[in-house]
Image: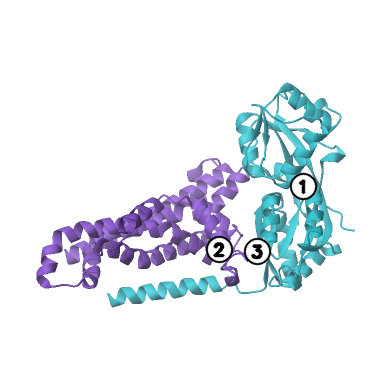
Amino acid sequence: MENNAFYVALSLLLNFDAALFQIVALSLQISLLAVLVAAVLGFPLGAAVALWRFPGRGGLIVVLNALMGLPPVVAGLIVYLSLSRAGPLGEWGLLFTPGAMVIAQVLLVLPILAALSRQKVEELLGEYREQFVSLGMSRSRMVPTLLWDARFALLTILLAGFGRASAEVGAVMMVGGNIEGVTRVMTTSIVLETGKGNLPLALGLGVVLLSLIMLVNACAYWVGEMTRRRTG
Amino acid sequence: MKKTLNLLLAGVTSIGLAFSAYAEDHITLASTTSTENSGLFSSILPKFEDATGIDVRVVAVGTGQAFEIARRGDADSLLVHDTAGEQRFVEDGYASERADVMYNDFVLIGPAGDPANISKAKTAEEAFAAIAKAEAPFASRGDDSGTNRAELRLWANAGVEPDGDWYRELGSGMGPTLNTAAAMDAYVMSDRATWVAFGNRQNLTLLFEGDKVLFNQYGSLLLSEDKHPHLKHDLALKWHNWLISEEGQQAIADFKVDGQQLFFPNAK
């Protein structure tokens, strides 16, 4: 019974272990904040690339699409070298803090949000172009209109970004250092417990993480449905 | 829309507050997976914090990576197990002082059937030679950690160039290497602390121990104030001195897993 991951997960949750609760809360905070920052930067970027024509646009789209596959460990290495005391941003003293983990996850999530929203906005633009022209709307006025109209697709894109952020381990391990009580999150705990040979506990933590991601998705679905009903 | 913005703002502020709540006195310690995974730090760090009010944040990595973190000025203190490497670190000017803190030992682990018959060996040299001769699968850390460096020295002592299908360089930490060795019934060298605390042994068992060359010394390093003036040298000095003080040495000796002492204090 003690070797069953679901049993372990359930007893972890029912015992309401304070250390586990703190780890879960930190995972959520870091990933949600990273997705929020990435959305604030990424959605307008995606819309701008969809709307404006400029030299090198094709190249930028290829780069954004390619960066969706940026290996987390490479993102971690880039952030590590930048934030290290010997690196260009060493003054900030952010290495091995939750802030460094947020930066690394923004780097991973931003291309996904920008590339996918660019595609969605471009599709919508095709449908509405004539209307916009007849209204004499400027491009910068179109950005909020199109983003608002794409909101349901953007919600799904946000979830894809959140999935990437909460699931990755390579980057947060490297820039956070997996420090107990400070930068230990769900995925780095799972790596640690696997290393100790506590496989049932590691899998139990995995079940908890999965449940958490499912909960976030359920909330997003519910919010989406409510908004859809109210605004049509 | 305004409501949503307010909500977002409140969320961001509370997250910011949560992050800045870590502002008490702390140092970052780069150390090895063996000290962290065995539970030593969870046992001794609260005692140090009680005595000094300083929170020690451990980044547990391989010894090679720990040196690199300290070299770049990203840790305030260093506790590792590669005496030769530590002395070079002092000579190169990255550390001002090195002190012996404690030791444990390496043990040879392998499948219970012991195909290379190393449990009969008299010395570690014989045991390593027997594994090579039998070409029995051997899982090596292969990650430039203290354990990996010690293992390579032992192969050299035995006059063996480890090579071939039987010798598998995994490039991973001690725990993951034990997991892999358990799955492929391979021989593996581990520090005793990680082995005793390891939970997924399957068919693996301790086959060889006790030779003096398997002795594993840990040292604490005081990092250079010249190279990295921004580090918390005063707090790091307190930690270094506590480790080699009577109190710190007693805390290390008091740490036991299943009634077994895993680290033996030996500061001078």
**Residue at point 75%, 39% (across, down):** B151
Q: Which residue is mark 2?
A: A82
Q: Amino acid at mark 1?
A: Gly
Closer to the camera in the image, B141 or A219: B141
Number of the front mark, 3 or 2: 2
Q: Which mark is residue B144?
A: none
Quick check: can you spot residue A197? yes
Q: Which residue is mark 3?
A: B74
Closer to the camera in the image, B154 or A181: B154
Image colour assigned to chain A: purple
Judged from the image, the secondary structure of the residue bearing numbered disc 1 is loop
Q: Quadrant of residue A89?
A: bottom right
Q: Which mark is residue B259?
A: 1
- Taking A116 as reference, is B130 above or below it? above
Number of the front mark, 3 or 1: 3
Q: Quadrant of residue B167?
A: top right
Task: State how far apart marks 2 and 1 are (Cα).
Answer: 45 Å
Task: State how far apart marks 3 and 2 are (Cα).
Answer: 12 Å
- Taking A158 as reference, is A207 above or below it? above
Q: Residue furthest right?
A: B268
Q: Colour scheme of this structure image?
A: by chain
Q: Residue A92: x and y, percent? A: 57, 71
On the rendered structure, is A228 left or right of B225? Answer: left
Q: Residue furthest left?
A: A134
Counting residues from the start of the chain, the first of labels 3 and 1 encountered is 3
Q: Amino acid at mark 2?
A: Ser
**Residue at point 46%, 64% (across, down):** A29
